[in-house]
Amino acid sequence: MVEAFHEDLRNTIRVSPHTAYRHYEEIHSYSDMWKMIRHFNHAIGGRSRCRIATLCAKSFKTYCAIFATILTGNTWVPLSPLTPPDRTVRMLEIAEPTVLIVHGSIDPIIASHARKLGIEVIDIADPDTLLGSLDLASVDVRPDDFAMIYFTSGTTGMPKGVPVTQDSLALNVANILSLVAIGQKEVFADYHDLSFVISVPILFPCAMMQGAISPAVHERDQLMPVAHMVRNQVSTLITVPSTIVRILKILRGTKLPDLNVLISCGEPLHLDVLESSLNTLCPRNMYNFYGSTEVGPWTFHHPCSLSDIERFREFGYLPIGKPIEGNEIRLTDEDELVVAGRQVSPGYLMGVGAGQFVEENDKRWYYTGDKVSLYQDVYICKGRLDSQVKVSGQRVELLDVESHLRYLDGVEGAVCLTRGSDETRHIVAILLSSRDFSTTEVRDHLAK
């Protein structure tokens, strides 16, 4: 499966006559992409079986760098320019990449660390960087090779590097294409950070089906997704419910392109959002997916319909559905979901969190920390068993936030909790202190 996936991906990008990238007036073909991939292969010196990190905003060159990394048998390590420098440095220490691809200048802290570790920094904004060209050599890719290393989507706590194997990537893409009615030449919206594992079901099915990626490059694309969708003729939307809610709020009679697929993941999908989506957006298909970086990234799916509103009224939100092929599941006595199968990561880098990956009966099981129960013939996720919460699809450890708040001068104690529904959920901090604090001071402290 792995060899077939790589061959199909390579051949599709190399010979497709269609559009590969679309952002308003900036349009690039797959022919343009293949040329750029060969430039990148020259820039990285024809390396294979290395770890290549990207620390770039979304652009056509960035996507080409990603596909070049995968097609040359290297391991992609996606990092976010929005992450605080000290946290990025920690991720580099854990991932140990050979190459760091950037766009323009980078923070001095990151640059200094890269020099100390001997990481080669390649700036794709430099016109001289991509002058040469090197054809892609045939690479023997093994199923257990690392295709990518994601860091858990949490914005707090110790970063945990999660390897995704070549076998897991190939199986994920095959499952998505078999489960979801994606046609050729679709336009895929990309509204999420590349360091979020939702990039897997966006990037690779898009390329395999000769679709075009249409990213949110500017803040206005994030804030006004409807205008972006209309102008760029988006027909496939893979996102979290909070983005769907934002779209519904600003739609106001605007006619959207004919959505071929609307997929929801990352947060509970509430029934009122489902009803509004089906009645207002009128997608040809809508699915609710569930997964995590460690089981990469989707392990359950549920096709949505209006009949779900009555069927699951007592819960108020949709089930995660049924396990996807290649995943074996069980529930512990505490109703914790445990997953085994080809999609399960080999475990966190540097051996951290070893207790979550357990070898039992010649199988590697991942303990998700999610409380799940069986209802009729589908599974319902009822939240976390620990202090971890999700805000806008991002994992946040409340205990970690509390710990950092206690470093503020004058704070004797701190407790965090969440308020609001899932699409408007936010964190509230209660401080016991000997002085007054402004919200700005607290936020600036935590942002570091």
Image (tube, helix red, strand yellow):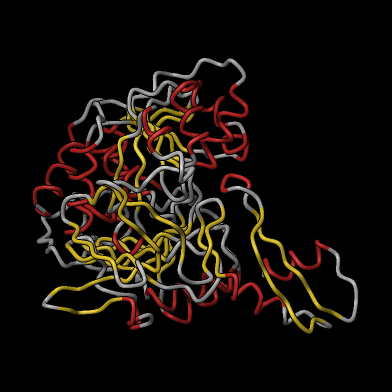
Q: How many marks?
A: 0
**Image point 23% across, 54% down: which residue?**
169
Left/right of residue 43 with respect to residue 230 in the rendered view? left
Above or below, 345 against 187 in this view is below
Residue 39 visible at all: no
**Image point 37% across, 46% down: which residue?**
319
Left/right of residue 5 with respect to residue 44 in the rendered view? left
Identify which residue, 247 or 165, lies in the foreground: 247
Q: Which image quadrant: the C terminus?
A: bottom right
Residue 436 visible at all: yes
* Residue 428 locus on image (x, y percent): 71, 62
Identify which residue, 129 or 423, lies in the foreground: 423
Identify which residue, 224 or 48, lies in the foreground: 224
* Residue 285 locus on image (x, y percent): 33, 27
Above or below, 114 against 240 in this view is below
Residue 368 occupies quadrant? bottom left
* Residue 194 locus on image (x, y percent): 44, 52
* Residue 244 locus on image (x, y percent): 51, 35
